[in-house]
Image (tube, rainbow, N blue to C red):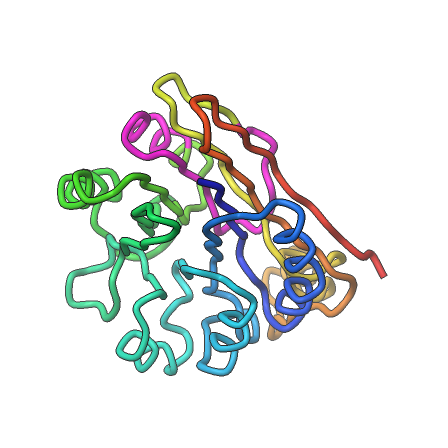
Amino acid sequence: MKFLFIGDIVGRTGRNALSEFLPSTIEKLKPDVIVANIENAAGGNGVTKKVYNQLKNLGIDVFTSGNHIYDKKDVFELFKETDDILRPANYPPAAEGKGFKILEKNGRRIGVINLMGRVFMGIALDCPFRKFDEIYEQIKDETDYIVVDFHAEATSEKNAFGYYVDGRAHVVYGTHSHVATADEKLLPKGTVYLSDIGMTGAYHSVIGMKIDEPIQKFLKGYSGRYEVSKDGLLFQAFFVDLSSDKPVFKRIKEFKAD
């Protein structure tokens, strides 16, 4: 089974980058399952029905998210109308949406789990470690593969989580920081791990946004409204091939700087 995981899609520029680079990536790598983080896909925050439909038409199987998933009101209807958009499973139980999905593809059952870290996130969340334990007990006998999008700020928390679930999840990858890490590795008990895929958005930007306002925030302590940058295209993803006993995995980066 071959997987393609796509980092945070940031605004229209991120969607344009997907349209530019995803078809050729699919043709080259032939993934069986594609999972993408959608929480920043509409205007840099949240997702709308129009954006969801556009991305779905590109062949994405499951959409994960994070702390911005509720920023657009369309998501509440999308949760009712679709079954392929996830919100972090460790949100309070009353929160709309679901935190994991079992997908059937090519005769295999894949459990996709979305969790969010608690360090520096500013949201009252259940423990993602214990929430994984809970979900794992529910789905371990019903799945052939388990993959986790761990949406978190602190690399230490991501690392700790990866080792905590080593041997239970087949793949753990991080999202949220919009900055790719180069620490992909096979953990001792067989889990493929990467701290952060990075974003799919503007090549010249500060985490996908126009450069000036973030700079002003650091200089002055405040800034105006952040806007999605349109300067260049960047596509970042993580490819994992679990077809044999020895996993094959690599980071993917495609870009147009102008």
Q: Does 167 appear in magenta? A: yes
Up-down: is 21 above or below 95?
A: above
Asked if residue 145 shows in the view, the reply is yes
Residue shown at the point (39%, 28%) measured from the top left: 191
Does 254 sit left or right of 30 as displayed? Answer: right
Camera-side residue of 224 and 42 = 42
Query: On the picture, is 3 further left or further right than 76?
Result: right
Closer to us: 231 or 49: 49
Work out whether residue 115 can be spotted. Answer: no
Residue at the image point whose x is 49% and y is 62% from the top: 60
Q: Is residue 65 above or below residue 1?
A: below
Residue farthest to the top, as pictured: 188
Q: In this figure, what is the number of numbered marks?
A: 0
Q: Quadrant of the N terminus?
A: top left
The magenta stretch is: 159-184
Q: Quadrant of residue 61?
A: bottom left
Write the residue at 40% across / 60% down. 62
In the shown orientation, is residue 49 left or right of residue 198? left
Q: Quadrant of the C terminus?
A: bottom right
Percent across and percent down for residue 160 are: 36, 29
181 lies left or right of 50: right
Q: Position of residue 104 (x, y in %)?
A: 32, 54
Residue 155, x across and y down, in percent: 46, 35
Q: Residue furthest front?
A: 107
Residue 105 x, y percent position in the rendering = 37, 52
Q: Quadrant of residue 144?
A: top left
